């Protein structure tokens, strides 16, 4: 069999369709676990696989959708999880398709706020099943029918931890175009799953082909990964006697398959209610054709995401606002609350800053009186469902930072790494493991740079090391480190010149403006003037207090003018 990864974004690959309904049609009992036939009557599964192959399917998905230990335990089969999963791959491979894709459905556990399962519990369930499937050497792993982006993200990370097979992940949407539990839209889902390590992303189940089409188009615009789609054969309809049926015809599925292919979808199949007749129609429409992918290149910029909001930080676009107020320094009420494990003040500050215009929220727990590990993870988890604004996780405690990265069901930004070896080795592996973006401070951790040139050299060092962890320039936001005016009279000029030089190199910059006014009077006016100057220079993001009306007015005015003037690149796209 050819390596499936070598075919990515090249030729269309037709997938098979529904398995469970065909097993029921062959006489298995409705209350019998569908995977038990992998051992009791493997010829039933083999017959279905062969019917799909004869219809034109080039890739077969294994009969292992409900193969987690949790779901098997409901039928008294937990101790046979490894046996049943491995058998599913062996049966599929015996039919000799072009490709065998090992199928993994939801874990059966629910994460906060829908249940009490932990990251490690869900991770372990996925890792166990995927490890069993991978041991029989399928061509890829497919994690599908995900309705919670947090669970989907964990599934991808678990798969990457136990095998080196390509990982496909397919999510499901309701009629509003959002994942039912997490409320995630298609573009945001694609970004979060790509950051987690997915090799192919897509949509399956829930909706019929006509309703899936605009959703996969949104997804196509957010990622250059190969795309997969397996819609239901229409929306389910239940008769008075309780029989569920689907009314999308093979011809309708074929018409949709051609439309999917025109959007650049490579893996095209069907889901609930479908039959080999639907697969045959799909193959007739798109089988043996090349993939047409008109939008392989993403827009430039750094992407951050909460479960319900996607934020792009760019070099030439609007300046992004990062709210700074969830920081115990000089915030006695916040410090007192966090020290006692009370998150209410932090949540209130998050809501206020989001309402005032913050695009991202910096979450800082750096205080000796705060139990950073519990508080950081608790804040990341609570804020994911309190505000839509994506998070910047700012913590010196590596264990606390990792705990927050585990539970945050989006793409966070880590604040921060510096160019010192200790910091790079501490933070970059976490960014790689959890799919986070990173703020890079232009210092080596020992002293502050004395010149713009030295800052650029430190940016080069960070870029070079980040590449070793799979992070490119669009995953890095460089903090130009404005010093206090009382300590450095040239602080403003140095910061602005660094922003200009980073822009010339097409690198992203961020500036914490309040540093400039340290120990000075009339802070709001000074900060507002600095914010205006930085926005005019082309800073990518500002860390500021969005509830300071003077500062926000200056920012908004400068940002509006910047967009009206259509900020242009200062030079060619080059690396440092």
Image (cartoon, rainbow, N blue to C red):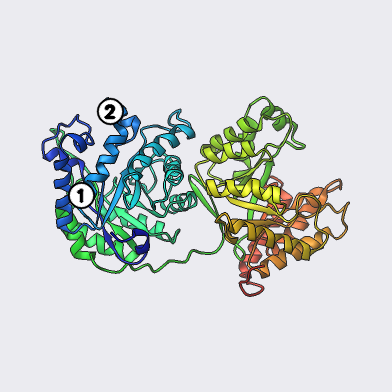
Q: Position of residue 44 (x, y in %)?
A: 14, 41
User: In front here: 301 or 385?
Assistant: 301
**Residue bearing the label numbered 1:** 94
**Label 2 vs label 1: CA separation?**
24 Å
Residue 249 seen in the current view: no
Please tell me how crowded label 2 is: few (under 14), some (14-19), or many (20+) other residues with Cα within 10 Å.
some
Instruction: State the residue in front, 8 or 508.
Output: 8
Q: Does residue 92 appear to the left or right of 187 in the view shown?
A: left
Residue at the spot 20% in from the left edge and 49% down from the top edge? 94
Return the mark for residue 77. 2
Look at the numbered disc 1 and give the secondary structure of its residue: helix
Which residue occupies 86% across, 54% down?
Answer: 485
Q: Is residue 239 above or below residue 572?
A: above
**Quadrant position of residue 532:** bottom right
x and y percentages locating residue 108 in the rendered image: 36, 33
The image shows residue 75, relative to residue 353, as above or below, that is above
x%, y% of residue 493?
A: 81, 63
Query: Could you say which is closer to the camera, residue 20 or residue 141?
Result: 141
Can residue 351 be seen from the camera position used here?
Answer: yes
In the structure shown, which secondary structural element does the residue marked by tag 2 occupy?
loop
Residue that appears at 33% across and 49% down = 137
Sequence-wise, which precedes: disc 2 or disc 1?
2
Marker disc for residue 213: none
Q: In this view of the protein, which residue sits in the foreground, 535 or 435?
A: 435
Q: Tell me the residue at 23%/48% (across/down).
A: 92
For residue 58, what is the image quadrant?
Answer: bottom left
Point out residue 238 in the picture as x, y percentages from the top left corner. Answer: 18, 38
């Amino acid at each position: 069999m050819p390596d499936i990864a070598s075919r990515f974004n090249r030729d269309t690959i037709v997938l098979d369709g529904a398995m469970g309904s065909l097993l029921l049609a062959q006489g298995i009992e409705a209350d019998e676990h569908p995977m038990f036939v992998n051992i009791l009557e493997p010829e039933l599964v083999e017959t279905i696989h062969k019917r799909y192959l004869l219809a034109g399917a080039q890739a077969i998905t294994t009969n292992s959708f409900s193969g987690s230990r949790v779901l098997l335990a409901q039928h008294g089969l937990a101790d046979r999880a490894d046996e049943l999963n491995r058998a599913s791959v062996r049966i599929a491979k015996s039919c000799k398709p072009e490709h065998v894709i090992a199928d993994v459905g939801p874990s059966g556990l629910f994460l906060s706020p829908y249940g009490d399962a932990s990251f490690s519990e869900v991770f372990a369930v996925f890792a166990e099943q995927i490890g069993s499937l991978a041991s029989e050497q399928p061509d890829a792993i497919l994690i599908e029918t995900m309705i919670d982006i947090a669970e989907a993200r964990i599934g991808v990370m678990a798969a990457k931890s136990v095998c080196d097979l390509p990982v496909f992940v397919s999510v499901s949407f309701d009629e509003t175009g959002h994942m039912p539990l997490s409320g995630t839209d298609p573009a945001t889902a694609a970004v979060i799953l790509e950051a987690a390590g997915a090799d192919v992303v897509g949509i399956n189940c829930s909706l019929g082909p006509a309703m899936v089409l605009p959703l996969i188009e949104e997804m196509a615009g957010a990622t250059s990964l190969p795309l997969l789609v397996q819609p239901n054969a229409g929306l389910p309809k239940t008769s008075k006697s309780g029989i569920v049926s689907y009314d999308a015809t093979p011809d309708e599925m074929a018409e949709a398959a051609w439309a999917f292919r025109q959007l650049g979808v490579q893996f095209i199949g069907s889901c609930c209610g479908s039959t080999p007749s639907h697969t045959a129609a799909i193959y007739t429409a798109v089988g043996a054709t090349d993939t047409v992918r008109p939008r392989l290149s993403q827009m430039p910029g750094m992407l951050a995401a909460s479960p319900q909001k996607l934020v792009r930080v760019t070099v030439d676009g609007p300046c992004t606002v990062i709210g700074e107020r969830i920081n115990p320094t000089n915030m006695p009420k916040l410090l007192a609350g966090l020290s006692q494990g009370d998150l209410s003040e932090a949540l209130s500050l998050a809501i206020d800053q989001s309402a005032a215009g913050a695009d991202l929220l910096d979450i800082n727990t750096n205080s000796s009186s705060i139990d950073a590990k519990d508080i950081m993870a608790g804040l990341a988890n609570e804020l994911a469902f309190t505000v839509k604004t994506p998070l910047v996780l700012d913590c010196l405690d590596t264990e606390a930072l990792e705990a927050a990265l585990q539970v945050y069901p989006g793409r966070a930004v880590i604040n921060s790494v510096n160019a010192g070896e200790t910091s790079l080795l501490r933070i970059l592996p976490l960014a790689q493991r959890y799919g986070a973006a990173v703020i890079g401070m232009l210092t080596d951790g020992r002293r502050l740079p004395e010149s713009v040139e030295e800052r650029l050299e430190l940016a080069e060092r960070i870029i070079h090391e980040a590449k070793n962890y799979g992070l490119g320039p669009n995953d890095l936001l460089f903090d130009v480190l404005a010093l206090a005016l009382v300590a450095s009279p040239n602080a403003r000029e140095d910061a602005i010149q660094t922003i200009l030089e980073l822009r010339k190199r097409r690198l992203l910059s961020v500036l914490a403006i309040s540093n400039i006014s340290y120990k000075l009077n009339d802070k709001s006016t000074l900060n507002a003037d600095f914010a205006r100057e930085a926005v005019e220079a082309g800073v990518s993001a500002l860390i500021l207090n969005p509830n300071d009306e003077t500062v926000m007015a200056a920012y908004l005015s400068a940002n509006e003018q910047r967009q009206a003037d259509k900020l242009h690149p200062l030079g060619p796209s080059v690396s440092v």
